[in-house]
Amino acid sequence: MNRWKYRCPDCGAEYDIAPGRYLCDKCSGANAAGKPLEGVLECVWEGDWRGGPESVPLPVEREYFPPLPVGDTPLWAPERLRAELGVPGLWLKDDTCNPSGSYKDRASWLVAAFARKHGIREIALASTGNAASSMACVGAAAGLAITVFLPKAAPAAKRIQVLQYGAALREVDGTYDVAFDESLAYSEATGVLSRNTAYNPLTIEGKKTAAFEIARALGRAESDASDSTGTHGTPDSPGTPGAALTAPAVWRAPDHVFVPTGDGVIIAGVIRGFEDLIKLGRIRAMPRIWAAQAEGSSAIARAFETGVFESRPSDTIADSISVDVPRNGSYALKKLKAYGGGAVVSSDEDILRAQAYLSRMSGLFAEPSSACAFAGFLKSRSAIGPDESVVVMLTGSGLKDIKSAAKAVGTAVY
């Protein structure tokens, strides 16, 4: 059995993966109000990975995972978009198919498994909406109590999801950043497990799983040229992380991945996944990872250019990636810089147009935060070679924010 631990990528300190451990003791001493978190930890394992040929290394044994079909979402080819845009290597990673309709289920699933393993009965978190509805959904399947701190401005559909799943909803007068602080205060006062993004390292670890699915599906696509449909899902049985299947003939990383980015946890998780694939020898190199941000909430993109994080009030229709201070900004920026990634910013108008265009040309209805990744891809086509492959990550269903989607109807003209 492999031994797992937390490791600080900055100072090298190592810690047991245990309840109550969140940040590096040494590096978190530099944390200050209005700045991204320092001391964010990574999950690492020692020795040769002993899982099956297609397994995803995760730090919790699979028997603790809730009985919910998280992950193994489709990676498919949008034929009309490929033809009209002249990008034959375009792929859509459709995480709207997760149980709560969001990519966040990947992190919630792992956090819930950790809680079940250690006999923890309650999890608390702050959210702009998707992480809240996700944790409430997974908590319902796992039999866990979930307490959510959610800004009152969050879309109604996400609040209703939280309540439908039976979680305790605490609405906050203020932004996500205020909710984050209130949630941490609650966790510290009560001792319940915090799922706060980046603060809990498992939120990054859970989100790496999509990188494995992408590389596996592209490998199968490459080895199955006779498939005329251009659609390739992943055949793992849902609810079985680390399941060993017959290895594909090829594992293949895409050339580019566009990731909707707010706090920086999804993009960090995607990079961690590709790092693990390189470590396992399944791929040779990191794709070019693009942080796609909304103009009204672009702290990571600004810091990508200037090297400095500055706190500005966020104001964007893409609520799921709207944060004043990206809590995982420092960690994500270091990863982006280390691997030659990029950052692209889109206006709310461009996001809404991209949302409607994507829906009408592919049949995939994504919320504004996801459409931001597609808008970023459209803005960056000049940086993509004619033979290069591109994956656009679509992380939330458009049904989660009908009010915003209504503004885009009739505007999909390119």
Image (spheres, rainbow, N blue to C red):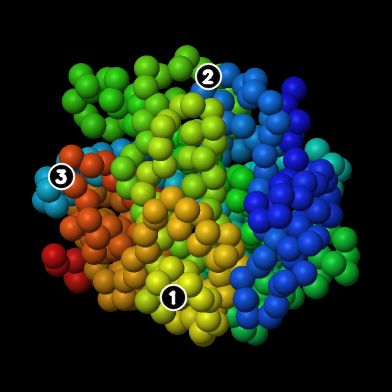
* Structural crowding at the residue carrying mark 3, measured as other residues with C-alpha within 10 Å and reported as few (<14), some (14–19) or many (≥20): few
Q: Which mark is residue 53?
A: 2
Query: Which residue is depicted at the point 22% across and 22% down?
Result: 225
Q: Given contact means CB atoms under 8 Å apart, are the residues at marks 3 and 1 in contact?
A: no
Q: Which mark is residue 281?
A: none
Please state which amino acid type lies under the numbered disc 1.
Thr
Side of 393 relative to 328 (left or right): left
On the question of residue 132 being in view, the answer is: yes
Counting residues from the N terminus, which is met first, the one under dot 2 or under dot 1? 2
* Coordinates of residue 324 in the picture (x, y in percent): 54, 78
Q: Secondary structure at mark 1?
A: helix
Counting residues from the N terminus, which is met first, the one under dot 2 or under dot 3? 2
* Structural crowding at the residue carrying mark 2, measured as other residues with C-alpha within 10 Å and reported as few (<14), some (14–19) or many (≥20): some
Side of 364 relative to 100 (left or right): left
Residue at the disc numbered 3: 386
> Looking at the picture, does residue 125 appear above or below residue 295?
above
Counting residues from the N terminus, which is met first, the one under dot 3 or under dot 1? 1
On the question of residue 140 being in view, the answer is: no
> Which of pointers 3 and 1 indicates the residue nearer the eye?
1
The N terminus sits in image quarter = top right
Q: Nearer the viewer, residue 35 or 367?
A: 35
Residue at the disc numbered 1: 306
